[in-house]
């Protein structure tokens, strides 16, 4: 793992462990379907296994971890149906969040979106795939952070970490996809600025539909590769 996982005693250790593991999944430090080693993770964090277990239970509640009795804890593995439903959920929520943010906190939201696009441009220039994924997530999160509707934010939080993990792990390897993604986010920014949510909604639908296809195809390909690898090692 790239980053130090040791925890500082500022808030509950379980809460800190939850956030650190959640970030590691979103950043692809733990691959989809990978076993999360509870004991070594506790040592890396400088804590006992208890807060790590509590964190894994919370992450299972979020849908990011699957705990298999007598076998251990694993990063979630989406089905094709899961991916389709997550994308459909996004499609329903994001334009509404953008409309609400425009009406209630336009200036603050536009600034946050602009900052995210700048980070995406910088990351793309430096070919930093993980940083690009962070900036992409930051852009979409900004719509919900400024929509001034706690229920809409809570609805998005049900899938936001899964989306971040899928984005990092399944689209990061494709340079041409990031180029197209960046251009679309620039258009989103301009449409938000002028309040053209008819075109914003059309572009969002196209953006999410294409993302859904990319996620699905990349995951199916990865599962086939893993299956072939498993056969070879037998």
Image (cartoon, rainbow, N blue to C red):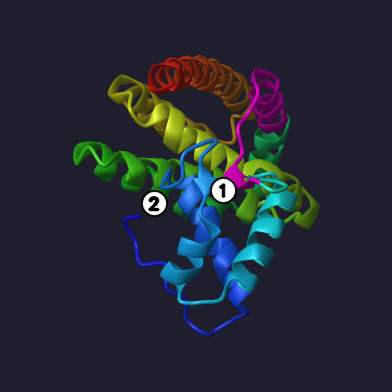
Q: Earlier in the sequence, mark 1 or mark 2?
A: 2
How far is the residue under mark 1 from the one under mark 2?
12 Å
Residue 5 or residue 96, whichever sits in front: 5
Query: The C terminus appears in which quarter of the rendering?
Result: top left
Query: The N terminus appears in which quarter of the rendering?
Result: bottom left
Q: Residue at x 55, y 21 (%)?
A: 203
Q: Is residue 43 visible?
A: yes
Q: Quadrant of residue 94?
A: top right
- Identify whether 32 is placed above or below 36: above
Q: Residue furthest right?
A: 151
Q: Is residue 107 visible?
A: no
Question: Mark 2 — residue?
Answer: 115
Left or right position of 186 against 75: left
Reply yes or no: does residue 89 show up in magenta: yes
Q: Residue furthest bottom?
A: 9
Q: Residue furthest left?
A: 126
Q: Residue at x 58, y 25 (%)?
A: 204
- Identify whether 24 is placed above or below 203: below
Residue range corresponding to the magenta coloring: 71-91
Q: Quadrant of residue 169?
A: top left
Asked which secondary structure carries label 1, the reply is helix
Left or right position of 186 against 64: left
Asked which secondary structure carries label 2, the reply is helix
Question: Mark 1 and 2 residues: CB-CB less than 8 Å, in contact?
Answer: no
Left or right position of 226 against 60: left
Q: Nearer the viewer, mark 1 or mark 2?
A: 1
- Identify whether 60 is placed above or below 232: below
Give how far across and how far down residue 227 sits, in percent: 48, 18
Residue 41 or residue 174, whichever sits in front: 41
Question: Mark 1 — residue?
Answer: 141
């Amino acid at each position: 793992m790239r980053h130090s996982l040791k925890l500082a005693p500022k808030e509950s250790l379980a809460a800190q462990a939850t956030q650190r593991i959640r970030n590691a999944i979103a950043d692809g430090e733990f691959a989809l379907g990978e076993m999360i080693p509870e004991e070594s993770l506790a040592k890396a964090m400088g804590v006992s296994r208890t807060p790590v277990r509590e964190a894994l239970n919370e992450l299972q509640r979020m849908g990011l971890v699957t705990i298999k009795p007598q076998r251990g804890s694993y990063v979630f593995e989406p089905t094709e149906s899961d991916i389709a439903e997550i994308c459909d959920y996004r499609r329903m929520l994001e334009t509404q969040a953008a409309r609400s943010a425009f009406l209630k906190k336009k200036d603050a939201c536009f600034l946050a979106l602009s900052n995210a696009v700048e980070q995406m441009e910088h990351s793309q220039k430096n070919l930093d795939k993980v940083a690009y994924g962070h900036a992409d997530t930051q852009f979409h999160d900004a719509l919900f952070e400024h929509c001034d509707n706690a229920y809409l934010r809570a609805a998005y939080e049900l899938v936001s970490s899964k989306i971040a993990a899928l984005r990092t792990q399944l689209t990061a390897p494709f340079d041409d996809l990031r180029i197209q993604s960046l251009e679309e986010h620039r258009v989103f920014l301009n449409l938000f600025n002028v309040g053209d949510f008819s075109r914003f909604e059309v572009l969002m639908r196209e953006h999410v539909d294409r993302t859904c296809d990319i996620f699905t195809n990349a995951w199916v390909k990865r599962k086939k590769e893993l299956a072939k690898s498993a056969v070879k090692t037998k």
